[in-house]
Image (cartoon, helix red, strand yellow):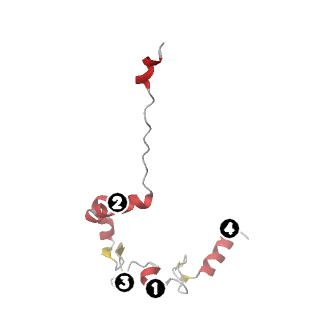
Amino acid sequence: MKEEEFEDDKPEEIKTVKAKTAKEMKAMYRPVFRKTPEKYYPTKVFSKFNYTRNECKCGTIYWRRVEARDTCGDSGCVGKYSFIGKGFGKGAKGQKITYVDAWNSYKETMGK
């Protein structure tokens, strides 16, 4: 075989494609999600439970049930972590519990 027979058999040039990061993909599709939320989110379910869709001053879209709230709740918008010192949930009997209460309950349930 002669060398000239292989001239057309040069290896193909390899092209690399840069993949987008999750953050880049979200930024790319966020306008689509905003335009047609019913296509991507269970909007009927949220409405059934009296949630309304709102836009925060920072531009984030969020769902809320409390009409008095006007921000998304992120610490950057509110200016602080609003849950500190308030307790974060309800216990089995419906009473407010603190982090310490939750931890003690966990320890009792799982053993020491």
Cα separation between marks 2 and 4: 45 Å
Q: Residues within 10 Å of mark 3 (few under 14, many from 20)?
A: few
Residue 110's mark? 4
Earlier-in-chain disc, 3 versus 1: 3
Which residue lies at the image location 45% right of the left edge and 30% below the top edge?
11
> Which residue lies under the disc numbered 1?
79
Q: Which of the two discs, 2 and 4, sits closer to the camera?
A: 2
- Where is residue 24? Give x, y as percent: 40, 60
Cα separation between marks 2 and 1: 28 Å
Amino acid found under the numbered disc labelled 2: Met
62 with respect to 107 (left or right): left
Amino acid found under the numbered disc labelled 3: Arg
Q: Which of the two discs, 2 and 1, sits closer to the camera?
A: 2
Cα separation between marks 3 and 2: 28 Å
Q: Is residue 20 above or below residue 67?
A: above
- Where is residue 54? Give x, y as percent: 31, 75
Cα separation between marks 4 and 1: 37 Å
Q: Secondary structure at mark 2?
A: helix
Which residue lies at the image location 35% right of the left edge and 86% below the top edge?
68
> Which residue lies under the disc numbered 3?
69
Q: Secondary structure at mark 3?
A: loop
> Which residue lies under the disc numbered 2?
28
Earlier-in-chain disc, 3 versus 2: 2
